[in-house]
Amino acid sequence: KPDMQTLQGLLKPTADQIGLCYDFAADRKNKAFQHTKVVSECLQGLTWVAYMPGSGMSMPMKTVQESWNSAEFFANKLLMQHRGKDDNQVQWVNTLKQLMKDLADYVKAHHPTGPAWNARGADAKTFKAAAGGSSGPTSGGPPAAPPPPPPGSLQEAKPSGGAAGGNKAALFAELNKGGAVTSGLKKVTSDMKSKNRSDRTGVVKAAPKKQAKQGPKVGTTGIVAGKWLVEGHVQNKEIVIEAPKTNQAVLITGNTDSVVQIKGKVNTIVVDNCKKVGVIFQDVVSTVETVNCKSIQLQPMGKVGSIAIDKTDGCMIYLSDASKEADITTAKSSELNVVVQEGDDYKEYPLPEQFVSKYVDGKFVTMPAEHGAG
C-alpha cells in the first residue's frame, strides 16, 4: 500500500484528465453540453480509488453512486430530447448508466472499504505507466485504447483567416483605381440633399438602450440562522450542500440558470423566486416547495413526503422509484410535467392545469378538464 504522496503521484495523470473534462463541460455554448456534463459527472466516480479512512470522502461504492446521481440529471434531459427520435442517443445513455451500475457493484464486491492493495506486490514507487507510442498490443494484455479525438472536436471549428485576406486584397485593388473609383457612384441631385428634404425634421432620435446580459455570478451558500441559504447565483452549475443535518431546512432563493445538489437528508426545501434552476436532492422529511418560479426542475433521489408547486410557470419533476409515492400539490401554476422511472425506461405525464366544477347532489364536484377534437 503506497503512502499518500506516492498515491497522489500515481493518480495525477487521471486527475488531470478529469479536471480537463470538467472544465470542457462547463462551456454551455458547446452543442454537446448535455453529453459532456454526463461524462464529466461520471468521471468523478473514478475518484473512489483515492479513498482513505479520515479523508472526508464518501465510501467507494457511494462515491460511484453519487457521481451517477449527478450525471442522471443531465442524462434524463437527453432521454427526453431524443426518445422516439434517435435510438443511438438513448442507447448511449442507457449503456453509460449500466456501466456506472456495474462499477458500483464491482467496488462493493472487491473494494467496499477502500482500494484493496496486494501485500505481496511490488513497491508502488517503482510503477511506470506504459509508453503511449507502442504500435500494437503487448502479448497477453488487452489491446491498446483507440487514439483520443482531436481537441475541440465537439465544438464548431473557427473560421480561417482566408476570407479576411481576400477582402483586404479587394479593398486595395479598388483604392488603386484612383479617380476611377468614384465612376460608379450616383449623382446627388438638389432634392436629395438633406437641407431640401421635407421628410427630415432635424431631430435626432436616441438609439434604444440594449440591456446588458447578466454574466456568471457566485452568490451565497451557507448556514444562516440554522438553515441553509442558497442565494444570488447566476449560471452556477456547481452549487453543492454537503452533509446537511436532518432537522435543517434549505432555502434556495433569487437564483438564475443554476443547479443545486443537496447531498444528505434534510427537513424541508423551499425554492423561491428562481428561474431556470435545477435541484437534485436526497431524502426530505417534510415538503419540497416551489413558489414564484419559472422553468424549475426537481429530481428527488430518495424519499420525499410531498411536493408543493405554487405560482410556478414550467416545472419538471423527475421521480425515482423511491419517490413515486410523494403527494404533488399544485396551485396557480402552468406547464407542469412529471417524469416517472418505470424499470429502465422513463415516461412523462403532464399534470392538469384546468378544472371543471359541476354541482351534483348538493355539492360541487371538480374534475380535470379534458380537451379533445371532433
Image (cartoon, rainbow, N blue to C red):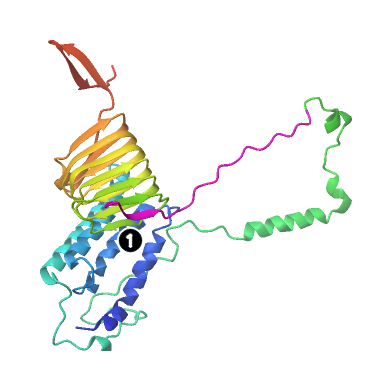
Q: Position of residue 123 (x, y in %)?
A: 22, 88
Judged left or right of residue 176, residue 283 is: left
- Which quadrant would residue 10 be assigned to in this image? bottom left
Q: Amino acid at mark 1?
A: Ser
Q: Is residue 303 visible?
A: yes
Q: Position of residue 50 (x, y in %)?
A: 24, 73
Q: Residue shown at 35%/38% (left/top)?
A: 293
Relative depth, front residue between 326 and 167: 326
Residues drawn in magenta: 201-227
Judged left or right of residue 23, residue 349 is: left
Mark 1 nearby-residue class (10 Å; few <14, some 14–19, many ≥20): many
Judged left or right of residue 16, residue 184 is: right
Q: Taking 109 as reference, is 122 above or below it?
A: below
Q: Position of residue 196 (x, y in %)?
A: 86, 28
Dominant SS type (magenta)? loop
Q: Taking 335 as reference, is 46 above or below it?
A: below
Q: Tag 1's secondary structure?
A: helix
- Which quadrant would residue 84 be assigned to in this image? top left
- Residue ID for mark 1: 40
**Quarter in which the C terminus is drawn:** top left
Name, please, the residue furthest toward the left: 109
Q: Position of residue 217 (x, y in %)?
A: 45, 53
Q: Is residue 88 visible?
A: no
**Quarter in which the N terminus is drawn:** bottom left
Name, please, the residue furthest toward the front: 225
Q: Residue shown at 30%/72% (left/top)?
A: 145
